[in-house]
Amino acid sequence: MDDKDFAFLKQLVETPSPSGYEQPAQRVVRAQLAAAADELTTDVMGNLIARLAGQGGPKLMLAGHCDEIGFMVQYVDDNGFIYFGAIGGVDPHLSPGQRIRIHTANGELNGVIGKKAIHLIEPKDRDTVIKLKDQFIDIGCASREEVERLVQIGDPVTFAVGVERLQGDRLTSRAFDDKMGAFIVAQVLKRVKAAGGMAADLYAVSTVQEEVGLRGAATSSYGINPDVGIVVEVTHATDYPDVDKKSIGRVELGKGPVLARGANINPILFELLSQTAADEKIPLQVIGVPRATGTDANVMQLSRGGVATALLGIPLRYMHTPVEVLSLADLDNAIALLTAVVQKIKPQQSFIPQ
């Protein structure tokens, strides 16, 4: 990944976009695709849809969601402490003692989620998880009136961390889930455009509100009505301590993107992706998913009369924490694989299982 592409990834991941508040991130994606897409639109849900016209092939939709988990301001007490609710699946173990940012109409405010000192906690209570409704944000104000001059009910909140390099090509950040998917989808459209196009009519979609119910993918799939769809998501890496490989499979950072196989996946599209990876010598991992996946692929597959759907994952450690970890090589290989697959889809190609 060159410096220009890395700068795009870093900017997108660090731009706040909790579910329902995605437009700052969508503006980053829009700026990247404005020169490449034949058509660029935003629907009423906030999904960003970039279209690249094909040559009579089927409609192909690539989707990655740009929303992240976070919090929302819900109540301010008389002493100026802010109580909040979760946006998406936030682990209440993680939030006490974290630095956060509140994203207000007038800009970002720094704050902390307060945590009683261990000296003041009874030994019997030290292992007890503090319920999210009892956690609070401190922004340094002394009264409710002071807070309310700065913050509004409903303002979104994110962890105050961004992209940092670890050893080798490993990165850590909040919100790789799934802004790196939106990044990959955008990069594929740009690569296909630069290569001269394809037969398929390509729709690259940065979807919204995945973390609160796969909502943006449901509406954008219905609106586009694709014949074929590939969702790019994170998937649980199992190459670190205390993860049960038997229930997920062997998934390792740096060993390539992960192709799901099971009821949610069209078998012909699965074979096309697998064979393309082999032909192009792109490393690929496979996991078995014996039921519906909890991803945008679920609602995409069931849209209208059904969509031939696949799910390509990027191995991720520590999902839904402020310290998610991935390998840049897996992103590069996912982009290469999807670019090749898009160019292989032929006019009148059938994905109906026989």
Image: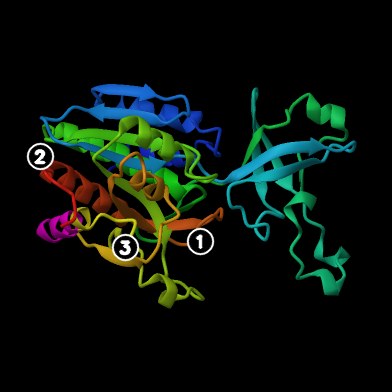
User: What's the residue at 49%, 56% (across, down)?
Assistant: 324
SS category of the residue bearing label 3 = strand
What residue is pinned by disc 3? 262
Q: Amino acid at mark 3?
A: Gly
Left or right: where does residue 277 sit relative to residue 310?
Answer: left
What residue is pinned by disc 2? 348
Q: Residue 245 at what x, y percent from top left?
A: 42, 75
Please identify the quadrant where the C terminus is shown. bottom left
Q: Is residue 47 above or below residue 185?
A: above
Left or right: where does residue 136 sit relative to residue 162?
Answer: right
Q: Residue 286 at what x, y percent from top left?
A: 28, 65
Q: Callout 3: 10 Å neighbours few (<14), some, many (20+)? A: some
Which is the main secondary structure of the residues drawn in magenta?
helix
Magenta region, residue range: 271-281
Q: Are marks 1 and 2 in contact (CB under 8 Å)?
A: no
Residue 318: assigned label = 1
